[in-house]
Image (cartoon, rainbow, N blue to C red):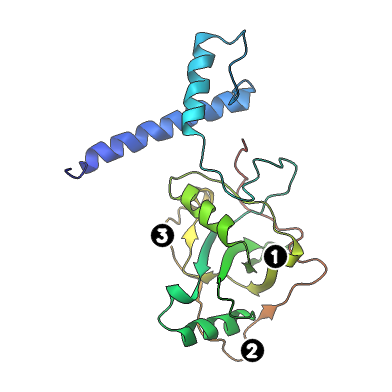
Amino acid sequence: MPDIDPREAEYLRQIELLADDVVNRALDEGWLSFDPDPDDATPLHRAVNALGRQLRHYHFEDDGCVDTDAPLVGLAGALLVRPTTVVSEQEYIDICERLGVEPRPQGWALWHTWDQKGRRITMVTTRMSTTEGMLRVWSKGRHLMPVKPPRAAVAATVKGWLGPAVRSPGYAAETGVTEAAAAASVSPRSPGAPITTPSSNEGQGIQPDVSPTSRD
């Protein structure tokens, strides 16, 4: 099967973005329904509802669609660090030491976020499947933030953003930063590297500088 023409791919992507805009406006107006159409739905409402069901984003653990009251975490970016994603086992061990965490076989998810004072921090969390699902949604250009993990799921917070990381669509739109740039490399810990272990306030008061996405 021949590769799709780049211009056709751009056209299809533009159609998808416009369709997302239509569905989001219906959601803002309060009548979009992912359930069976109500009896009084107009033909336009039925058509937009069908469009919304077709475009409904990929669901993953802690995407905020089930528990709509759960607080979300504003993220600028995210990445996964696993033994299989680095050059050697020793490099993975060194990275974990830099982060101040144990070298788990499952790896760690690194979330670029902010503390209560708006300073950049990297949250080191066990939320691997959440991060995988979130990155998949981001790859489609959709801005979605995860539910704030419980304290037990956060192993450490590190000052600054360690990367390189995939930038969230919301942060990219707000700042114009679209590339997976790194504020600092995830390398073996240097003397005096700032690491903060979880405290009684871990994960509290995370302040995003972009608005969370709408939920289902």
Marks 1 and 2, Cα distance to the nearest angstrom?
Answer: 25 Å
Q: Is residue 199 left or right of residue 65?
A: right
Q: Residues within 10 Å of mark 1 (few under 14, many from 20)?
A: some
Q: Amino acid at mark 3?
A: Glu
Residue at x 16% of width, y 43% of height = 2
Instruction: Tell me which label, 1 or 2, sits earlier in the chain.
Output: 1
Marks 1 and 3, Cα distance to the nearest angstrom?
Answer: 28 Å
Residue at x 64% of width, y 40% of height = 65
Residue at x 49% of width, y 22% of height = 50
Q: Which one is closest to the eye, mark 1 or mark 2?
A: 1
Q: Residues within 10 Å of mark 3 (few under 14, many from 20)?
A: few
Q: Is residue 40 left or right of residue 140?
A: right
Name which quarter of the figure residue 124 lies in: bottom right
Q: Percent x, y for residue 170?
A: 53, 48
Residue 192: mark in rendering: 2
Q: Amino acid at mark 2?
A: Gly
Q: Percent x, y for residue 54?
A: 46, 30
Q: Is residue 20 left or right of residue 62?
A: left
Q: Percent x, y for residue 34?
A: 58, 26
Q: Percent x, y for residue 115?
A: 70, 64
Q: Is residue 144 above or below residue 206?
A: above
Q: Residues within 10 Å of mark 2 (few under 14, many from 20)?
A: few
The residue lying toward the viewer, choosing from 107 and 10, is 107
Q: Is residue 92 left or right of residue 204?
A: left
Name which quarter of the figure residue 38 lies in: top right
In the picture, which quadrant includes the C terminus? top right
Residue designated by label 1: 153
Is mark 1 in CB contact (under 8 Å) with mark 2? Answer: no
Query: Which SS class for mark 1?
Result: helix
Q: Is residue 116 above or below residue 216?
A: below
Is mark 3 in CB contact (under 8 Å) with mark 2? Answer: no
Residue designated by label 3: 179
